[in-house]
Image: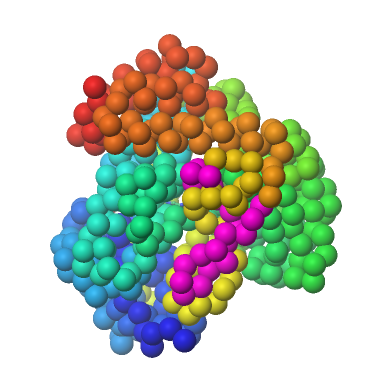
Amino acid sequence: MGKASYAVTIAGGGSTFTPGIALMLLEERDRFPVNKITFYDNFAERQEIVARACEIYFRENAPEIEFSYTTDPETAFTGTDFVLAHIRVGLYAMREKDEKIPLKYGVLGQETCGPGGIAYGMRSIGGVIEILDYMEKYSPDAWMLNYSNPAAIVAEACRVLRPNSKIINICDMPVDLMDKMAYMCGVRDRRELQYSYYGLNHFGWWSKIFDKDGNDLMPEIKRHMAKNGYMDGIELTGEHAQHVEESWIHTFEKAKDVYAVDPDTIPNTYLKYYLYPDYVVETSNPEYTRANEVMDGREKKVFGECQRIIDAGTAKGCGFEADAHATYIVDLACALAENTMERFLLIVPNEGAVFNFDPTAMVEVPCIVGKNGYERICQGTIPQFQKGMMEQQVSVEKLVVQAWVEGSYQKLWQALTLSKTVPSAKVAKLILDDLIEANKGYWPELH
Ligand code: NAD
Ligand code: G6P
Ligand code: MN
């Protein structure tokens, strides 16, 4: 038995994902009772719009919940049990630069992969560590569940800089993909799937998938993957409505070609950036990247809806959606609070979970989660192909963190050079010098 009721702080209160998480917290109160919700952000005006709309929603649907929003760390983090963090240091304006600068040099531009992900990592580390420190100062027993990207680099930074902190880094991509797999196989709820998975964040593979009775679902999933990737037989509606834009649909379809490289496993969609970078560059518009799509789409939609609620003074008929992303974070908080011992894919120090891989790497593997944290499920020995790719990529991630800690230009250049998405040290340097210019005030000084 956990506490009777919990206090939750949402860090990055102005995030486009905040309304979905707020909604889910209300919907799931039977399982995970919440009596206090506080939004925290360092951008008061942005947070205010989301918070005022949620305030109306809470007042109408759960008046007993004590809700507030603030930019003051002491107010936000005192007396909290869970910090759900999803910040974006530099906002979409910097994401746009992360994506467009590499494209100038014929290299792909992506939020979390390649040079864009490295640039974002150099901005995120400080922001996430700052929130972790606030939590530990004002609520030393609390847990932080971090979604802030790039989760692989952020997780490695936390391992190095705050090894004993109660932080768990997570990603919702596998959750969405497991939703699709469950749907393909006629399984009602992805939570019934039993699976083996190994990799780094946005860089992993399923090696086994069973239904709740232990029947092997791999043959059926493989049949779908070989035909049309994750899009085979999927309707992107209802619960499957998280990643629905044209560019996401292409990514789900492209998984067919990613799968073809190793038909023994089922790949994470993000591997397309490493296995088909040339295709990604050819199909990118250097003038209009995913950041533009999100600013014109999700951001406008969420902030438009919030403003509409504020103007109407009521949230009746509001269009907020609680998607797989929100469900997962509440499920995880619930497991920690109520000791459910459910299985979650988490980003954790390897320490032998992948036998033939660096024990200090931050890997994404299934874990059993309860009140006292997580226990990894050993994934055994992985094949040469995956091991080779992971060794290269984990070195990129480790070099970025070392570059941030030491202020080392050399190590960041090495990180970019080592990325499978970058063709040479020369191109890496050109991109790096541009990124340094663009990230003035966000990155530590490099020498
Ligand atoms: P967003 O820009 O809409 O929201 C981010 C918020 O964080 C903004 O309101 C911003 O002001 C705030 N912020 C920035 N720096 C801060 C700091 N130092 N302290 C406090 N607040 C700060 O972004 P979004 O698209 O909603 O995404 C939010 C984050 O969630 C991103 O990092 C995104 O990559 C991540 N995300 C991760 C996953 C995952 O699978 N791990 C899934 C979805 C989103
Ligand atoms: C997936 C990934 C996240 C990413 C999110 C949103 O869910 O796991 O890490 O942030 O997609 O991407 P988008 O391009 O829609 O902002
Ligand atoms: Mn992710």
Residue 313 magenta: no
The answer to which quarter of the image holds residue 121 is top left
What sort of colour scheme is used for the picture?
Answer: rainbow
The answer to which quarter of the image holds residue 203 is top right
Main SS of residues in magenta: strand
Q: Is residue 352 left or right of residue 446?
A: right
> Compared with residue 130, is residue 8 higher up or lower down, i.e. above or below?
below
Which of the image's four quarters has the C terminus? top left
Q: Which residues are magenta?
A: 359-379
Rendering coords of residue 371 (x, y %): 46, 75
**Which residue occupies 53% across, 68% down?**
369
**Which residue occupies 48% across, 55% down?**
170
Closer-to-camera residue (291/90): 90
Q: Is residue 389 left or right of residue 312?
A: right
Q: How many marks?
A: 0
> Compared with residue 221, is residue 258 higher up or lower down, i.e. above or below?
above
Rendering coords of residue 191 (x, y %): 64, 68
- Residue 303 visible in the snapshot: no
- Residue 209 visible in the snapshot: yes
**Which residue occupies 60% across, 52% down?**
353
Rendering coords of residue 312 (x, y %): 29, 71
